[in-house]
Image (cartoon, rainbow, N blue to C red):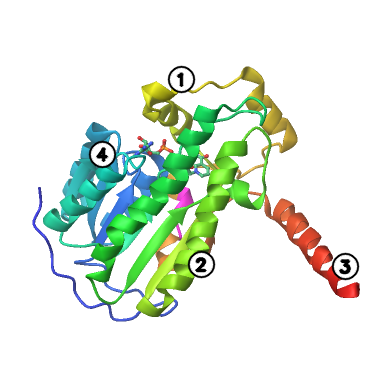
């Protein structure tokens, strides 16, 4: 367990000007693996203290130790289940006691449950919405006082998904949850604007992570097993075939994250070839406005 650290002042948060991250504190949920681990690596590499929070405590502890060894920054790790309010509240108390606050909060946990709309069960919906949506809400609610206790450069990052921009099939519960994450981020950004806490919504495409495996093992036993029918993946890929660059490493997905956070960008599209799909939806919405205005 490491001691709290005093932040150095951030010289500038202007576009293209690198602030000093030394003494700043990053909190990442889902930090034991994949995108969260890559985010934690990025922040520690910039000199920030890191709290690695995850339902998989041994793996989170492994990440925290590795970062402390590699970058000589304070780190801490804790088991947190973002599906449970008391667990998230306890993690915020832990971070306040060990690191002293939070300057960058990444509400990054998301679980996946494939399934056609008529096959997704009540339990599937309950689990995905509780973890992905309420998990992000709880994380922000419990850590906001830690962000507010700090001054200067502060950011919240919410992990949505490319499926919000280019929806697919057999992903109904997941997509609904990620649309909700975006909606939450939009409100949050407006509500926190006067406090200087920026909010960035991340839209990653496919990544080479343990997402399906770790989702299945994190699902509470009382909700029954996570079932994926063999044709779910096939149907999804047939609806929107993968193109070059659609699946990347999480390290590649975060390559510009710090720069985007410095610039306080509201949206970050990390990679992928789904721009045209997004533009078709945007064009259809524009056309809806055109028809309305013509009447
Ligand atoms: N992998 C992809 O292709 C992809 C694409 C778009 C968006 N995303 C999103 O990226 C984020 C990170 O996913 P990833 O691909 O790095 O997956 P990952 O499985 O590598 O990492 C997710 C982590 O979340 C943890 N976790 C699961 N349930 C939890 C809970 N209830 N409480 C706390 N921790 C929990 C897991 O233990 C795991 O360490 C998720 O929000 C996911 O929806 C992933």
> Where is mark 2, residue-wise?
266
> Where is mark 3, residue-wise?
291
Q: CA distance from mark 2 to mark 3?
A: 29 Å
Badge 1, how many Cα within 10 Å: few under 14, some, many 20+?
Answer: few
Of circles 1 and 2, which is in front? 1
Is ligand 1 within 8 Å of the beta carbon of the residue shown at mark 4? Answer: yes
The mark nearer the N terminus, 1 or 2, is 1
Question: Do labels 4 and 3 touch, CB within 8 Å?
Answer: no
Q: Secondary structure at mark 4?
A: helix
> Where is mark 4, residue-wise?
60
Of circles 4 and 3, which is in front? 3
Residue in view at x 29 percent, y 56 percent: 142
- Residue 225: which disc? 1
Say left or right for 294 vs 13. right
- Magenta extent: 252-256
Residue in view at x 61 percent, y 19 percent: 229
Say left or right for 55 vs 249. left
Q: CA distance from mark 1 to mark 3?
A: 47 Å
The mark nearer the N terminus, 1 or 4, is 4
């Amino acid at each position: 367990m490491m001691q709290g650290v005093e932040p150095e002042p951030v010289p500038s948060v202007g576009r293209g000007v690198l602030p000093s991250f030394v003494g700043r504190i990053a909190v990442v949920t889902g930090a034991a693996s994949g995108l969260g681990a890559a985010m934690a690596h990025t922040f520690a590499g910039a000199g920030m203290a890191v709290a690695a929070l995850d339902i998989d405590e041994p793996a989170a502890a492994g990440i925290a130790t590795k970062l402390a060894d590699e970058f000589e920054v304070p780190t801490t790790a804790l088991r947190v289940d973002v599906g449970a309010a008391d667990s998230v509240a306890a993690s915020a108390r832990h971070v306040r006691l060990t690191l002293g606050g939070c300057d960058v909060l990444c509400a990054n946990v998301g679980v996946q449950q494939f399934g056609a709309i008529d096959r997704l069960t009540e339990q599937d919906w309950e689990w995905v919405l509780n973890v992905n949506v309420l998990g992000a809400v709880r994380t922000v609610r419990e850590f906001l006082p830690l962000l507010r206790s700090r001054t200067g450069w502060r950011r919240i990052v919410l992990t949505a998904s490319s499926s919000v921009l280019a929806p697919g099939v057999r992903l109904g519960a997941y997509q609904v949850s990620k649309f909700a994450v975006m909606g939450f981020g939009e409100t949050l950004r407006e509500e926190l604007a006067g406090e200087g806490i920026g909010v960035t919504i991340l839209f990653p495409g496919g990544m080479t992570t343990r997402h399906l495996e770790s989702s299945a093992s994190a699902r509470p036993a009382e909700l029954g097993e996570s079932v994926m029918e063999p044709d779910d993946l096939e149907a999804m890929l047939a609806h929107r075939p993968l193109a070059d660059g659609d699946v990347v490493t999480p390290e590649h997905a975060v390559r510009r994250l710090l720069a985007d956070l410095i610039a306080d960008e509201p949206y970050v599209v990390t990679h992928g070839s789904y721009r045209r799909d997004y533009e078709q939806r945007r064009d259809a919405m524009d056309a809806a406005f055109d028809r309305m205005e013509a009447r």
